[in-house]
Image (cartoon, rainbow, N blue to C red):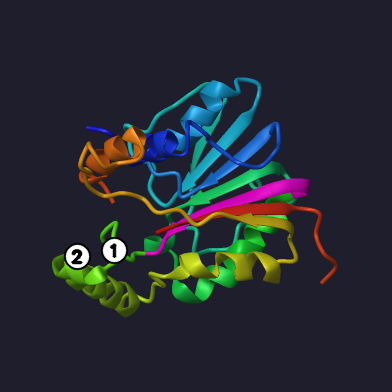
C-alpha cells in the first residue's frame, strides 16, 4: 500500500520541501506516523528534526536525529522543547481536519514565532473540489455529494474544510515576506494511457484511490492541493 507521503513525494518530483534552505533544525507539525519527518531526517543526517502530533503511534518511523513529541496543535506552543526562533524550517501539511476553525490565525502566528530569523514556513492543505479533467463537475455527481457532506460534517465539528484557499492571507497576516504559492491539481484515479500527458500523474492517481507589525524576515511557501 502506498502511503500519502509517498504519493505527494512522487507527485512533487521527489521534493521534500521547496524553500531554498539547508536546514539544521526542522519542525513537522501534525506529523502522524512521521513519514515526512523521518524522510527529512534520513536525507539530512546532520539536521535535528522534531515531529509533533496529538498522538504518536507506536509504529511511528524513527531516526537517530528525529524526536517525536506529543502536542495538541490547538494549544499554543508553550513548552521548553519548542522555544521561539528555534527552527530553520517549520512544516505543516494536511492538518485542517484537526485544527479548530477559529485557531488558524493564531496557529500560523505560532509557527512563525518558532521560526528563526530568515527561516521558512511551509504549509499545504487540500481544497476539496472534484471535477473531471474536462473541467466539468457535472460529470462526477457522486463525488460532489461526498464533498458537500464532508464539508458539512467538518463545519459541524468546528473545522474549516476550505482553509487551503486562505493560507496566503494567513501568512501575510503573520507579517511574512517572500510568500510563494502554487495550487496544484491532484489526480485521484487512473487516466487513459493513450491520452494522459504524464505517466507520473497516472501512477499518482491510481495510488491516491487508496488515500485521501514589522515584517518578519521569516519567509513562507505554501501549496494548495485541489
Q: Which quarter of the rendering shows the N terminus?
A: top left
Callout 2 touching callout 1 (CB < 8 Å): yes
Name the residue carrying label 2: 143
Res. 148 visible in picture:
yes
Q: Residue 29: x, y in percent?
A: 51, 49
Q: Is residue 25 above or below residue 176?
A: above
Q: Residue 192: x, y in percent?
A: 20, 42
Question: Which residue appears farthest toward the front when viewing the image?
Answer: 194
- The answer for how far apart the CA atoms under marks 2 and 1 are is 7 Å
Name the residue carrying label 1: 130
Question: Which residue appears farthest toward the right when viewing the image?
Answer: 214
120 or 202, which lies in front? 202
Q: Is residue 142 left or right of residue 76?
A: left
Magenta span: 116-127
The residue drawn where x is 25% and y is 39% is 207
Q: Is residue 173 left or right of residue 149?
A: right
Res. 34 visible in picture:
no
Q: Earlier in the sequence, mark 2 or mark 1?
A: 1
Amino acid at each position: 500500500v502506498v502511503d500519502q507521503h509517498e504519493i505527494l513525494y512522487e507527485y512533487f518530483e521527489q521534493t521534500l520541501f521547496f524553500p531554498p534552505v539547508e536546514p539544521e533544525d526542522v519542525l513537522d507539525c501534525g506529523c502522524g506516523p512521521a513519514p515526512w519527518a523521518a524522510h527529512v531526517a534520513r536525507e539530512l543526517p546532520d539536521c535535528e528534526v522534531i515531529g509533533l502530533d496529538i498522538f504518536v503511534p507506536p509504529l511511528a518511523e524513527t531516526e537517530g536525529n528525529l524526536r517525536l513529541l506529543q502536542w495538541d496543535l490547538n494549544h499554543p506552543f508553550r513548552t521548553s522543547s519548542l522555544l521561539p526562533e528555534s527552527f530553520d524550517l517549520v512544516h505543516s501539511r494536511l492538518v485542517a481536519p484537526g485544527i479548530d476553525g477559529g485557531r488558524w490565525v493564531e496557529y500560523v502566528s505560532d509557527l512563525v514565532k518558532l521560526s528563526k530569523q530568515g527561516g521558512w514556513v511551509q504549509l499545504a492543505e487540500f481544497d476539496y473540489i472534484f471535477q473531471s479533467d474536462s473541467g466539468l463537475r457535472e460529470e462526477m455527481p457522486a463525488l460532489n455529494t461526498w464533498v458537500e457532506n464532508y464539508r458539512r460534517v467538518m463545519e459541524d465539528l468546528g473545522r474549516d474544510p476550505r482553509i487551503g484557499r486562505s493560507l496566503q492571507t494567513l501568512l501575510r497576516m503573520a507579517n511574512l515576506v517572500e510568500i510563494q504559492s502554487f495550487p496544484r491539481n491532484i489526480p485521484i484515479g487512473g487516466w487513459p494511457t493513450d491520452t494522459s500527458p504524464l505517466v507520473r500523474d497516472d501512477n499518482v492517481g491510481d495510488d491516491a484511490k487508496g488515500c485521501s507589525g514589522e515584517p518578519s524576515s521569516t519567509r513562507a511557501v505554501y501549496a494548495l492541493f485541489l
